[in-house]
Structures are given as structure tokens and as C-alpha cells.
Image (cartoon, rainbow, N blue to C red):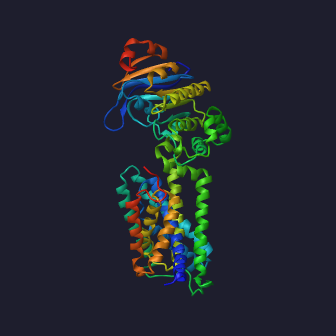
Amino acid sequence: MSEPDLILDMNALVGGYGGNDILKGASLTVRRNEIVVIVGPNGAGKSTLMKSAFGLVKIRQGSVTFEGEDITNMRPDLVVRRGMSYVPQEKNVFPSMTVQENLEMGGYLRKRGIAEKMDHIFQIFPRLKERRKQAAGSMSGGERQMVAMGRALMLDPTLILMDEPTAGLSPLFIEQTFDRIIEVNKLGISVLMVEQNAKQALEIAHRGYVLAMGRNRHEDTGAGLLGNQEIAEMFLGG
Amino acid sequence: MDFTDLLQLVVYGMVLGSILTLGAIGVSLLFGILRFSNFAHGDIMTFGAYTAFVVISVFHGPVWLALPVGMIGGALISIIADQLVYRHLRRTQPVILLISSFGMALIIRSIIQLIWGTQDKSLVKGIQMPMHFGDIAVRPDHIWIFGGCVGIVIAVHLFLTYTRMGKAMRAMSDNMDLARVTGIDAEKVIICTWALGGALAAAAGVFLALDTRLTPMMGWSALLPIFAAAILGGFGKPYGAIVGGMVIGIVSELSTAVMPPAYKPAIAFTVMVIMLIVKPNGLLGARR
């Protein structure tokens, strides 16, 4: 823990949802301004590892440290207050509420500056501004993903967690979503994401983790993992 | 039975419907957020009406003051019930909550009978002369009840649309898990929802007592048409409850033109069953 840039440190986590441990000693770190991607086969525990940073998984052993503070098994609404946002894979908007209301909910804990922050988010996602009176539930998958990201940005997080942000999107939207993630990262926000589109995700990632059977399998820079023959064959589809 | 009689029944139906609407909005809000049907809702109505009765009988206060006091009573008993019982059952199956709300209904009704006795009472004494609009007779009470309900429904609408807490309630009802990870304090929203639902139930109780009489069973007997109204509008959709309440109210009253009034709850139930068969998600329910 001597690295000053270390913001998230997940150390040897063992845990899961019920009686079964999905994580069997997985570790992960995120440094300031980094994009970190978790890839791996289905059932490897990728989403579980990420959710365990957010108090959504019961951790039995190991620790999660965020900005120097122990947040192991902390309640999600308290983790949010500390500057970490989470974008779930599905059901990541409030469907009956308008785009604007969704963003307002993202800023629920903000005392002031909600309008300014929303303007800022509309600059990143101009499409949301056009549609701000529309119910989020009536939008396309790609647009909903923008609403979800916008919502997560309302509190000026230092770290944003994204669970398969491109799942179910068309190739065009996948490209756009990755572009937005780069843009968000340029604002000084660290990104930790789980991705099925591993190749594209690793292309924009600073570092990546390959997870298998709830344990770390490989850890390298994005480019390093992309260039690794063994990993390419096993997980990246040739 | 001519057109004027039918119109007269529609007027009665609108009064009954507006009372049912207040009850159904509360049931719907609570279901949307807590995912269980609160069987104690009718008895919260009764409790609110009796609280209002104290203002009138003991302190000789006016009805317009008794209404908000009754609403506070309804809100308080709901919060107490939540904190004493339901809070400990947050993570259990809905059926367990449903059964415990049935128990809570009996407890509240017994408390009412212990304090106020089992005899019928009337909220306001004296006979009111109806006003005539053409051939339609309307009691001044009915105008107050209908106007009061409309005012309260508008206030609830503004609350849900424009306030931070109102929006948080809608967010919780939309997606509880997302609301939690967004940083919304779920427990606080739940308590506020109980307060709102309880206050609306109490208002419905006061209006029902104004329309008829104050009895310990009044809320319990209103529960079935209230649930019918909530289901008709789409359970968990407060705006659907308005439509549902009006339809059930008017259909129930119209039915008295062709069959004995004792069948009113059966009519409400029939409408509900037909709705569940034809469009299970209710008039305003989302398609799934």
C-alpha cells in the first residue's frame, strides 16, 4: 500500500452470494486515471469480483481498500458517498422516469451544483440532452447505457465500475460506448469494467486482468494481454 | 329508472370512487416500494377516522381541522407498525409480510375497539339538506369529499413529480437495487412512503366516515374495493389507482340500479377478476 496512486485495492478476496464461494482468492488494483478491464470465460467470477468492491457480494476473506479506507462489506449507499459509482449490466436505469430525473437521482447525494453537473453530462452525451424529457424505459439499449453512465457520473466519482457496458449493443453503439469511456477517463475518472468484447476493451485499457475459476490467471497491460498468444487463443477467440 | 336516476348514481359513484382512490393510491405506493399487499390498510383508514373523531367529539374542533389531524394519526400508526413489525421482515418473502399485515389489521382494529368501543358513531351530527342541480341532489358533504379528494390527489401528484423525496419514491418503485447503488437511503424512503400511504388512508377514512358512519369495521369492509381499484389501475402504479378507484366506485353505485346494494363489493370484485383475466397488468400497467 505504498503506491500513492493506488485508489482501489482488492486483496485475496474469497466470497460469493450464498453459501458458495465464487471468488477464491482474487486480487485486483486500480490506480488513479487508469482504465482496468477484467476479462475471462463465463462463470469466472468477473462481475462478482467487481461487485465485491461495491458491497454487493458477501466477502468472507480478504479486504477491499478504497482511497486508503477499508470498505470491505460496506453498504452500497455508503460506498457511493466515498466516490465510487456502479453501473449494473442490466436494469441500469429507472424506466418510468425521464432522462433528466434519472440524472437527478444520480445526484441524489449532491447538495448543490446538480444543474451544472447535468449540463456537463449533456456535453459528453449530447443525445441525452435532446431526449431529457423522455422516459428512460422507452429508449434503445445504447441510449440507456448513456443514461446509466450519466447517472453514475453525477456525483463526480473518482472511480466508476461498469458491468459489461456493451452487452447487447450493436457494433456501432459498442464503438461509441468505448469512445465515451475514454472520454470519461480523460476527465480524471478511473474506470474498472468487465467486458465480453475483450479485444476492444483491452485496446482502450491501461491494464487488464484475466480471471478464471474465481482466481487471477494473468495480469498485464492491455496491449500485453492482447499480444499474449496463450490468452488470445483461450479467451479472445483466436 | 331513467337517465336522471343513472346520473344521480354516477354522482354517488364519483364520491365513493374518490374515497377508494385515496385508499388505492396508498396501497399502490406501498406495493410499488415494499412489494407486498398491505392488508392493514383498511384499518389504518379506520384509525385515521377515529383520530379525526377525537378532534370533533373531545375538542369540538371543525372538520377541516379534524382531517389533517386524522391524517397525521394514520401516518404515525403506519410508521409505528413498520418500525415494530415490517422493518424486521424486509428480506422475507412477500407472503410472510402479507400475513403479518393481516395480523396488524386485527391489532389496529382491536386497539380502536378498546379505545372507542364497538358502537357506531357519526363524525358530524345533524341532517344535511341536499342541494339540487336540476334533478340531481347533492349533499354538501359530497362536494367536500370529492373536492378534498381531488385536492389531495393533486398534492400527491405534485409531491411525486417535483420533490426530491417524491422522485426517490418513484426511483425505489422502479428499481430498488439501482436506487440503493445510486445512494438513495432506502429506509428513509420506506418510512416516508408509509407516512404518505397512512395519511392518504386516513383521509379516505375520514371521508368515508363523513359519507356514512364511523364503525370499527368500516375500513376492513372498504379493503376489497380498494384492492380492486388498485389492481384495476395496475398494482404499484399510483396513477392507475385514480382510474381504478373511479371505475370501481361508479360501477359499484350503478349496479344498485339493477341489484341490491349489498352486492356492491361483489361487483367490485367481479370487475377486478375480469380485469385480471383480460389485462393482468391493469389499465395503466406496463406490458411485460
Q: Image quadrant for the C terminus of chain A?
A: top left
Identity of the residue drawn at 63% across and 32% down: A124
Residue A101, horizontal then vertical, whole percent: 59, 46
- Front one among B200 and A236: A236
Q: Residue furthest left?
A: A19
At 45% across and 20% down in the image, what residue appears? A199
Furthest-front residue in this view: B2
Q: Position of residue B137 (x, y in %)?
A: 58, 83
Q: Nearer the viewer, residue B125 or A9?
A: B125
Residue B58 can be seen in this image: no
Residue plotted at (61% across, 62% down): B154
Q: Residue B282, located in which quarter of the rendered image?
A: bottom left
Q: How many marks?
A: 0
A23 horizontally vs A207: left or right: left
Residue B268 appears in the figure: yes
Tell me residue A82's x, y (percent).
55, 35
Q: Quadrant of residue A159?
A: top right
Which of A70/B183 is in front? Answer: B183
Residue A126, above or below B188 = above
Position of residue A72 measured from the top left corner of the image (x, y, whole percent) = 45, 33
